[in-house]
Amino acid sequence: MSTDFNHGMKVSLGGEFGIVVKSELDKPNLCGIIRWDNTNENDQEDWRGQFGTFISLGGKIIDNKYKFKYINDNGTLKK
């Protein structure tokens, strides 16, 4: 099991699904900006450094083959 977020990791929390995306603010070995799968143009949450909290709140790493409804695997909205 993973102990931290990785770019491209697919996750779920509270019935929402998302992907960890690259951010200009990321530091080496510290990522965790999650782009949630919805129609909002830029729905992101900063979970950097909070992987343990994410998991303890019920967050899960989901199968990498999961297909999002509204976003692509790089976090951009589908057209």
Image: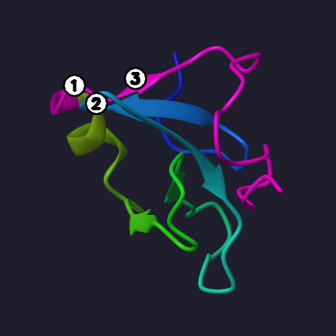
User: Is 51 within the magenta?
Assistant: no
Q: Give the alpha-carbon distance from disc 1 to disc 3, as whole Å.
A: 6 Å
Query: At label 2, which amino acid type do we have?
Result: Ile
Find out whether residue 73 is within the magenta segment: yes
Residue under label 1: 58
Residue designated by label 2: 55
The colour scheme is rainbow
Gap between marks 2 and 1, in whole Å? 5 Å
The quarter of the displayed image where residue 35 is located? bottom right
SS class, disc 2: helix
> What's the amino acid at mark 3?
Lys
Q: Is the C-beta separation of discs 1 and 3 under 8 Å? A: yes
User: Residue 67: where, in percent of width, then height?
Assistant: 72, 24
Magenta residues (range): 56-79
N-terminal label among 2 and 3: 2
Q: Which residue is mark 3?
A: 60
**Badge 3, how many Cα within 10 Å: few under 14, some, many 20+?**
some
On screen, residue 24 above or below 59: below
What is the magenta segment's predominant secondary structure?
Answer: loop
